[in-house]
Image: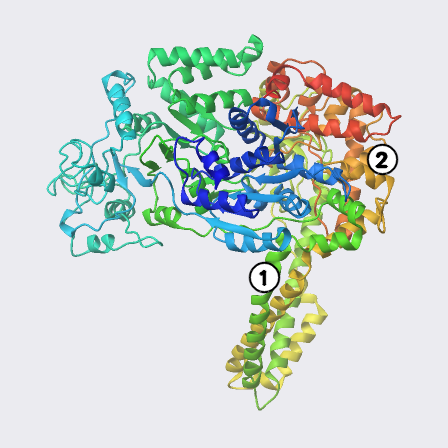
Amino acid sequence: MVALAQFAARYPFGLDPFQVEACEALAAGEGVLVAAPTGAGKTIVGEFAAFLALRGGRRCFYTTPIKALSNQKYADLVAAHGVANVGLLTGDTSRNGDAPVVVMTTEVLRNMLYASPEGSHRFDDLAYVVMDEVHYLADRQRGAVWEEVIIHLPAHVQLVSLSATVSNAEEFAQWLVTVRGHTRVIVSEHRPVPLWQHVLADRALYDLFVEDAAPLGDVYGGPRALKPAGPGSGPGPGAAAGRDRARDGARGERPGRVGAPGRQSRAARDAGPARPGRGGRNSHDGQRGRDDRPAGAGDDRNGAGDRAVGAVASDGRPVNPELLRLARLESSGPEWSRSGRPGPGGRPRRRPWVPSRPQVIERLDRDGLLPAITFVFSRVGCDAAVAACAAAGLRLTTSEQAAEIRAHVRARTAGIPDGDLRVLGYWEWLDGLERGLAAHHAGMLPVFKEVVEELFVRGLVRAVFATETLALGINMPARTVVLERLSKFNGQTRADITPGEYTQLTGRAGRRGIDIEGHAVVLWQPGLDPLAVAGLASTRTYPLRSSFRPSYNMAVNLVGRLGAERARTVLESSFAQFQADRAVVGLARQVRRNQAALDELTAEVECDRGSAHEYDQIRRDIREREKRLSREGAAHGRAEAAEALARLRTGDVVRVPAGRRMGLAVVLDVAVDPRSVDEPRPLVLTADRQVRRLSLIDFPVAVEPLGRVRVPRTFNPRDARSRRDLASSLHHAELRAEPGKRERARSAASDDAELARLRRALRAHPVHDCPRREEHLRKAERATRLRRETEALARKVEGRTNTVARTFDRVRAALTELDYLDGDTVTPKGARLARIYTEQDLIVAVCLDRGVWEPLTPAALAAAVSSLVFEPRGDDLAMPALPGDEDLRAALGATHRIYVQLSGVEQEHGLDFLRPPELGFVTAAYGWASGRSLERILGEDATELTAGDFVRWMRQLLDLLDQIAQTAGAGSPLRSTAREAMDALRRGVVAYSMTV
């Protein structure tokens, strides 16, 4: 095939079989779905689509989920095809949009499709659409965009879907066939660079799996000692040797580590005799004999040792017995000794030694395992890790490399004012970079992150500490990936990472064309279970689940383009409905089986004295009545507690009886929190100087003020001195004695006539005195449970049939009630809604319709609109001090009232799309639009805000302001106000961060 041969000749390496197969299918006119591991080279197929488009005089759109990835792919394609042939379209960048090949975020293509009426010739010359990271369609917030694009693309366009390895690729492909026509599925589990899994435990780097079975007598090899790093442990000869070993590693040599001890690695066996000191069979530095065993390797060959050797992961690979032994010793007692043997007199053993972050990097450097990415799952932790390594004197670069880094950084940050650089921690960041160390997380300024990525790819930064956001598509491979923990905070609680997340993170290990092997290292933590780690590393079941649901904007666009009935039919072709329909088949089969079993069980429930079913029903009626009375009593108690909270006034001192804020607190504010519609949530200062918003969860019983303190009118909850002074007043306040325990109220059940009647009926029933009563009731209970299960399954079957279309019907009903739709007609209000692309689309549209933002200044408009963009990182944020602009406060109040009204409409129609306005970014947006300095914005105005968060929210605010300017009425002053607000916001680091 000539085209493929010409394309392949551009690369210095040969294409893999899966790449060849996908490219051949594409050249033959088929759509393709390519599912392969991270780093396998899926994007080669997308690049071939761009090559074919240019070769044939057609166009290709290359879509990505995030702007950073769009920028990266744009640079790659410009390098391959020239700047004249490649364009870029993202939310805030438009460059050469009419080029033959255009890179864009997926949302941009979705908006283009909706902006083009059906029958438009806009896409006639579009031959290919590449959807990179198509597995994003499972994303709860943005996933629907991918399905919208796939469904609405013109039929002649060939779709190139690139996905991470998922277990239901065939199911996804079957859906693609139904909506796009013939689609070739290419699934590759092969990693071009093999990945080795390790655990760093007690100064040893252990292989997680023992892939080659070793004789039992050989399983007691020992680790090479890991020496603690002292304050003066800088680069020195050891670090230089580590860099030499890194070059050796690129040629295929393996680091010293413990596998099935005494065993040689596969790569080492293939390459020849093991290098001395590298952990091979003939190594004396990295290998101990059986008489010098690692911690706890006792002589238990006939006991636990045999069982340890037999432990295997889900894919059949045996787990390293040494790791199982360490876990067993840790769990057998509170402590264990460094040697693993009891000390003199049977002294207690201590836990395994866990290395510090500098010690981990030093170990990796010494073993030739850098460059490395360490996933920390905490922004603060990433920054602290770099600081700790710098404080330990760690330096991974030469003086020449440091100078090269310095020159690159200065060139990339030349446009940022010196004052802003100081606020952004520039000098500390630069010092870390010059040492070869860096953090990478969403809290960093975008240009800082980009510099880290560029220097890491060039091999100048050798150790990066990152949050999991780095794993989302950015091309930043390493030789080694380190996971500090196997759990992370998911916004609500700390949860274990999933096998899919583990694979996504560790998939960055191993650089194609540079490394012979990649390495994934899990750090030992107390309670770590090697079998659980093996399960994460060996599980291959990560199904792709649709998150699609119709939105308000989608509904008006579809009705406007297709009409209600055709739109309904189109939505029924979504992947969400496809999966629901497949699930219905199995559920219906289970319903039939349950019904047959229920018929048999019902016949067995017989009593010669009366109906056992009737008697069982009376018993269940009694239980339900008791539960209902209990709930009513609890609801009455909550109502009393809510009334007591509503009576509180500023300055009241209360005692919080339960929860994390238990203790004395002074009320600061009793205004309604816009995040809570149904209950009072007073803002308080606790005795330990924390400003928190409380709720009924903190007050299970009614609260009574114990006294009062004066709250100054100038009190600022973000000012540490103000909090300290008021807390001191709280400690010295004269308080009334707390009320004693109330006399326990008489139970409502004791006076309920209906409950008394049911109990009499139970005692009078003939089955009550049957000697086999309990046997009858057990069978009746089983029958009842089975009947309920069957009814629930039947409801699921009914609920999953046409689920997307029914949701669409409810959305249309709500929009009709609000005058955005009139049957198949989109009203003028609906036409405006169709041009608003945001999660809060309906609130924005109603605010525009009612002129809520008309009287505002540019700064006040930016602040008011920010409440519909911003989302706090946690749910425990105190209410911010708002600017004194009265028009702004009125607009925020009106926006909140609109949300409350729309929430009521949603509740009536069984919908739940909108979220309450958030005020956490109002002050920062107002200040920045008013010309305040970055130092003040990130300091006084927003103590919880980082530079990266600030720029990200500003970008989203600018995007929404641009939409408002475009959709405001032609004669409305709001249009010019929105543009003035955009001009005021687009300055300093915001303007600099919006350039490519």
The label on residue 484 is: none
Q: How far apart in space, not on screen, are marks 1 and 2 (Cα)?
A: 42 Å
Q: Do tag 1 and tag 2 residues touch (Cβ < 8 Å)?
A: no
Q: Please state if 648 lies on the left or on the right of 57 as rendered.
A: right
Residue lying farthest to the bottom in this orientation:
608
**Vertical side of 602 occupied by 634: above or below:** above
Q: In terms of depth relative to the viewer, which is nearer, 252 or 333? A: 252
Q: Which residue is mark 2?
A: 849
Taking the image as drawn, is residue 150 in sight?
yes
**Vertical side of 353 occupied by 244: above or below:** above
Q: Residue 710's x, y, as percent?
A: 68, 24
Residue lying farthest to the top in this orientation:
418
Packing grade of label 2 (10 A; few <14, some 14-19, many >=20) is some
Taking the image as drawn, is residue 496 in sight?
no
SS at badge 1? helix
Q: Which residue is mark 1?
A: 582
Q: Residue 930's x, y, as percent?
A: 72, 15
Which of labels 1 and 2 is toward the front?
A: 1
Q: Please state if 888 lies on the left or on the right of 490 as rendered.
A: right
Q: Quadrant of residue 135?
A: top right
Quarter of the image for the C terminus: give it. top right
- The residue at 33%/25% (across/down) is 358
**Vertical side of 158 occupied by 419: above or below:** above
Between discs 1 and 2, the one toward the N terminus: 1
Amino acid, disc 1:
Arg
Q: Quadrant of residue 293?
A: top left
Residue lying farthest to the front in this orientation:
2
